[in-house]
Image (tube, rainbow, N blue to C red):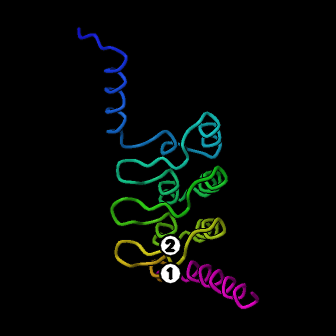
Amino acid sequence: MIKLGKKEKSLLESSFKKKETKRELHYAVDAKTVRLLVKKGANVNAKDVEGYTALHLAVTEKRLEIVRELIKSGAEVNAEEYGNKCTPLHLACMIGEKEIVKELVKAGGEIEQADKFGMTAMDYAKNSKEVTEVLKKEIDRIEKLFMKG
């Protein structure tokens, strides 16, 4: 049996943690669990090894209530994953989740933010008329604000 001092043990633990693929919020199955984990100190913007936050995963799993709770808890709606630089809004538009798109846009999701390939949320929304309409309404709203100012 090998004895480790406190310093060596903490190095071992931290290197193990870096290899973890998911964080506790990535496994949250409902909004109540998200609230509990955040209350206990879980980092709402922690990323896995691919750069996905819990918000990215909640979007791809079409978990509207978890998306709402993560946003309410301070999730970064414009966080980019490491590979393709996709944001939660890009993902929601890809899968055509109108209600999730509404929540992300309302929380400050950047419609014009491009991913690694130069694609924006509007580009990804083209397969869903409903999602395209949500984005167009938000763009119109923003343009009207600028016209007034």
Q: Does the magenta run of residues contain 134? A: yes
Residue type at the position of mark 1: Met
Q: Indicate the quadrant where residue 12 lies.
A: top left
The C terminus lies in quadrant: bottom right
* Image mark count: 2
Left or right of 27: which side holds 103?
right
Local secondary structure at mark 1: helix
Tell me the crowding category of disc 1: few under 14, some 14 to 19, or many 20 or more residues within 10 angstroms, Cα based.
Answer: many
Q: Does the magenta run of residues contain 24? A: no
Local secondary structure at mark 2: helix
Q: Which residue is mark 1?
A: 122
Residue type at the position of mark 2: Cys
Q: Residue at x 40, y 59 (%)?
A: 81
Question: Would you place residue 8 above or below residue 75 in this image?
Answer: above
Q: Residue at x 69, y 83 (%)?
A: 141
Separation of marks 1 and 2 at Cα, in angstroms: 8 Å
Q: Position of residue 67 (x, y in %)?
A: 59, 56
Q: Position of residue 78 (x, y in %)?
A: 52, 64
* Residue at far right of view: 148
The magenta segment: 127-149
Q: Position of residue 17 (x, y in %)?
A: 37, 34
Main secondary structure found in the magenta portion: helix
- Which circle marks residue 93 in the picture? 2
Q: Residue at x 24, y 11 (%)?
A: 2
* Residues at circles 1 and 2 in contact by the CB criterion of under 8 Å: yes
The N terminus lies in quadrant: top left
- Pick whichever, 38 or 9, lies toward us: 9
